[in-house]
Amino acid sequence: MKMWEVNYDFYGVGQGLFCTGALLNNESKVVYQWIYDCGTNSKKDLLREKIKHYAVKTNDLNGSNFIDLICLSHFDHDHISGVVDILSRFKVGDVLLPYIPMWKRLVIAFEEKCRSGSYLMDFLIDPVAFLQRKATRGIGRIIYVSSPNDAPDEISEIPDNFISPRKLEPNEYNFDEELPISGQALIEGNYKAVNPDDSMLTAEDRENKNAGIKAQVLTLEVGACLQIFSVWEFVPYNDSCLVSLVNAKFKKKVLLKSKSLLLGKNNAERHSILTELKEIYDDVFGCKPYRRNVISLFLYTGPILSGNFCSWVIHSELYIWKQQNLQLRVVTEKSTLYFWPPTKSGVLYTGDGYLNTLKRINSLIDFLGEKRMKNIHLLQVMHHGAKGNWRSGLAKILNPEYSLFSSDPSLSSPGHPHSDVAKDFWNYNPIQVDKVNSATLTLHAGLTVISPEMSKKKRKRL
């Protein structure tokens, strides 16, 4: 049996989300580390302090400022406001984004009341160019994740550049080996080596636009995932859809103006186009009290559970801690020992995702599959515990070992987590991270092959 350890950190950034993780071998050597979202609507200093702590911790663990994977669930301020800081501090292997056509991204921009020339507006117009400019230490790959809800004309028809990586068998796995290319996880499934936005441009315009882009741009097809040593996996699920009524006029106008937006020679030209599009947006969509966008890139991470090869969690440790001037103080500690058979060993990040209907819940279950859904050790509860993203009885359906809320409960508005959501997860070890408290979950586990005799044993817990 091979031993491994995984650390999941959930930083208290108030009304926002900043999650990190690291996979270590039996010599406590980091072999892969990741970030899921990094932003807040609370004070900027709160987020900067946590990013600074993470940078120090990362350097202590692996002696370098390198992050293998950054996943951005969606493009709201409270989930991405710290990304520029992260990109200035770290070299990044892969950045994972939900693919959203430009016309939908501009709907988001206008809903968020983005100013022309602001970081968020520039990002939403051209995510690839923005990330490349801000990544002063470099990015290896920018990877879009397609949604099963995408219309056929919203994914580039540029011919596939398909690569099918060789699968390793479990007995070939060795945590003592380095990744062949640092930060280059294997992609299991189909993908296109294209930027979908480029399909709106001529070949000459594409060449001019991408002259300074050094990162490789890929688009994962539905169902593709990232694998580490063919033992650990990151499975993205893009559940984006636009739930507005009529949008053909706005969509058509954006397509007509997309070249000017992508190739805009100056801010004045781009501002003029955005002003025109905003007027059309107001005419088409009006001022509704509900969000028209249901967008969040879910991310399941855990050991690959295939055949009789499984993960066996031996020991878990949960710490709730406070930070002041980079000094940490543990507030609560919970230690659990497990015996055979295996307990859950995966984590499901949901961002601001919606699991408020049986249809959406079943779509997620069908996508991830029964084994992964039964392997959720910790669930990051959707949208800080907002009632509108939740359905009564959801906790029982997902059945996590722990349920984590990241919000600022002291705020009367928006009032996250909502009391009904908190009550639903009350029996699933709820954890609250906020402006004061952060949390770390560490799993010590083994990877083994189950024999028929072992599978009959009952689990015990101390």
Image (spheres, rainbow, N blue to C red):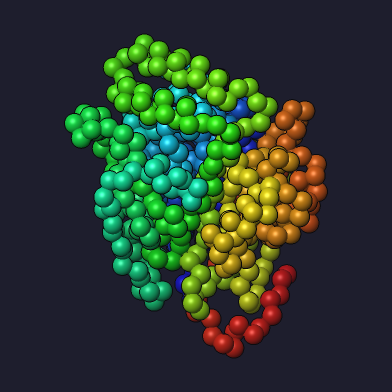
The image position of residue 366, as x and y in percent, is 57, 61
53 over 274 or under it: above or below: below
Q: Can the viewer see residue 383 in this picture?
A: yes
Instruction: Give the residue drawn at x 56%, y 20%.
Output: 282
* Residue 399 percent across, percent down from the top left: 70, 60
- On screen, residue 314 versus residue 109, left or right, reads right
Identity of the residue drawn at 78% across and 56% down? 427
The residue furthest bottom is 453
Q: Position of residue 428 (x, y in %)?
A: 74, 56
Is 44 above or below relative to 220?
Answer: above
Q: Nearer the viewer, residue 199 or 408?
A: 199
Q: Position of residue 386 (x, y in %)?
A: 70, 39
| Quadrant of the image containing the C terminus | bottom right
Instruction: Choose top left, top right, bottom left or bottom right for residue 259.
Output: top left
Question: In front here: 122 or 171?
Answer: 122
Please say whether residue 93 is visible from this viewpoint.
no
Q: Within the image, what quadrant is residue 25 found in?
A: bottom left
With 32 as the anchor, is 291 left or right in this view? right
- What residue appears at the point 57 percent right and 71 percent down from the top-left corner? 312
Residue in view at x 40 percent, y 53 percent = 221
